[in-house]
Image (tube, rainbow, N blue to C red):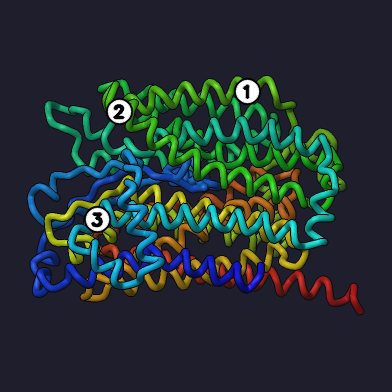
Amino acid sequence: MTKFTTQLLLLTLMAPVTAFGSAATTQSSPLAGIQHQSQQGHRLATAVRAVAPCSFSSSPFLRAFGAGGCRTRQTIHASAASGSSNAMGTRMKMCASISVPSLSLVSNVVGRLRGGAAAGSAIVHTMTPTRLFNTCLLAVALLTTTFKVLQAVDSRKDSEAAAAAAKAKPDSVKDLQRRFLAVFWLLRCADWLQGPYFYEVYASKIFGGQPASMSMISRLFLTGFASTALFGPGVGRLIDTYGRKKGTLAFSVLYAVGALSTKSPLLAVLLFGRVMSGIGTSLLFSAPESWLVGESQKSGDDPNGEYLGETFGLAYAGDSIVAIIAGQLASLAATSRGPTGPFELSTGFLLAGGLLASLLWKENMAGKSAGDDSNSKPSIGDAMNVIRGDPKIMMVGGVQSLFEAAMYIFVLQWPPAIAAAVSKSFGNGAGTPYGTVFSCFMACCLFGSTLFGQFAKMKGPTTEGVTTGMLAVATIAMSTATYTVSSATSGLPALVASFFAFEACVGMYFPSIGTLRSKYIPDSHRSVIMNLFGIPLNVLVVSVFMFVKYLGVNGALGISSSALALATLCMVRLNRILAKEVAPAIA
């Protein structure tokens, strides 16, 4: 990137922070002295996002909050609404409809870039949380678009990049990308559709003549998480033994069962559906990725994994767009059919994804390790021995467990953190536009995935080095958010900037970890190992969820920061191991 490119990107990135700073400053005086918020109780509400991966990988269960999941980003939000009785009665709806910035809003952003403070002061008196986050959404979208344009311009000017672009991509790679991405995005969309109305659909149930309590909804949530942790390793073994395509089809069936169970008023059926969804999450975050890596290795056209990293980048960049679209579809379905509408619509996408997989994918199973008996099958014990025998696998798995745990904890805590900061800046009755904030997060994820794609095309940076830098930035961002939440001031600009930075790191994480797993986890036990590292992940997230009322938002985000710091140390350790392996070869 040229110096001009860097300066322009920094200028664009400053737009949302400038907007937040102006609003917070002008609104602070009428809010001075408000102390009673800390004395108000926080009502715990759960909603589902995305990781991420994110569904899990790309997000496990929480990414399903992210997407089913950026494993891929189901995501659960623990929201604490404080303030007036109206605010306390408001239910958070993730992925709610995203209002499109008006022409006047666009002109305001342009005015800020051209006229600085003078332009800002002209609109500050009409600024609201919704308008403010719409401005941020527009700014992040402009940032991503600008980056993509400059990326294309720089590649044309760079002779080496032009030569690399001229090199024809093998037809087998193009075909594999088409087959994988079509199925992957459909399945992720199904996962994202369910997230926004997780809380609403269970809150609408009546048990023993009483509406479902928050405690009951929490138990249903934990049931899904527990089943992911409990059955994950066994599910991974079955995937490697009987085939990754079969595992993907099984996900479609089990997740559809879980979605349809929300139609029932019976608690036993709802619990059964959560168990099925938890098992489905394990399948979603291991079977499709294992299938992709297995097919790529079989073709032999991508020996260095160059195109595999590109495919992961495309998958998770598109996943961010899919999440935003799914949010709109979920809102429409809920308006038409009630809180079960998004779940019903989700089954249609699951059917379409499963049908495409059955038609486009060929079956592949785990390869055999050297010295293995031809009749042996992958086992959990063998997988654990493989992990113990290779410290590189341990470090990659540590990054997976720690980062995704931090991500899911963040998903639980960002709603109350943002709501409190908005209330301090705009007043006690100010509503937080959760749907627009979520869209901002997804736009940041898209930028992060795009940034990873740029690094993947460059010859200098390695995936290991890029991931180390990304984890360091994520640690700083989350630590800043933790400090901001604990401070007495509103801190809205710093909080939003740190959350945006972390979400950009989430966008980089999923293609990064997918590439690292393809390099270091052997195909013979790939799905088993991926699910084994999901156990500490789920244990940590569930533990924080169970004790969140004692930890508070600040304590939970502090644990997230610590997990990110440990993940960074794991990547540093991996780089040192690789350096030691290379040193004798050079000598």
Q: Height in image: 502 above or below 185?
A: below
Question: Which residue is labeled 1 in the image?
Answer: 356
In this view of the protein, which residue sits in the foreground, 30 or 366? 30
Q: Position of residue 133 (x, y in %)?
A: 32, 55
- Which circle marks residue 334 in the picture? 2
Marks 3 and 2 close (CB-CB < 8 Å): no
Q: Amino acid at mark 3?
A: Pro
521, 505: nearer the viewer: 505
Q: Quadrant of the N terminus?
A: bottom right
Q: Tell me the SS state at disc 2.
A: helix
Which amino acid, by three-letter code, is at mark 2? Ala
- Counting other residues with Cα less than 10 Å from the Cα at mark 2, is it few (<14), some (14-19), or many (20 or more)? many
Q: Earlier in the sequence, mark 1 or mark 2?
A: 2
Image depth: mark 1 or mark 3 in front: 3
The single residue placed furthest to the bottom in the displayed view is 587
Do the CB atoms of the residues marked 1 and 2 lie less than 8 Å apart?
no
For marks 3 and 2, give the CA distance. 24 Å
Which residue corresponds to the image point at 7% horizontal and 49% vertical from the top-left?
85
Residue 186, by quadrant, is: top right
Mark 1 → mark 3, Cα distance in angstroms? 42 Å
Residue, disc 3: 129
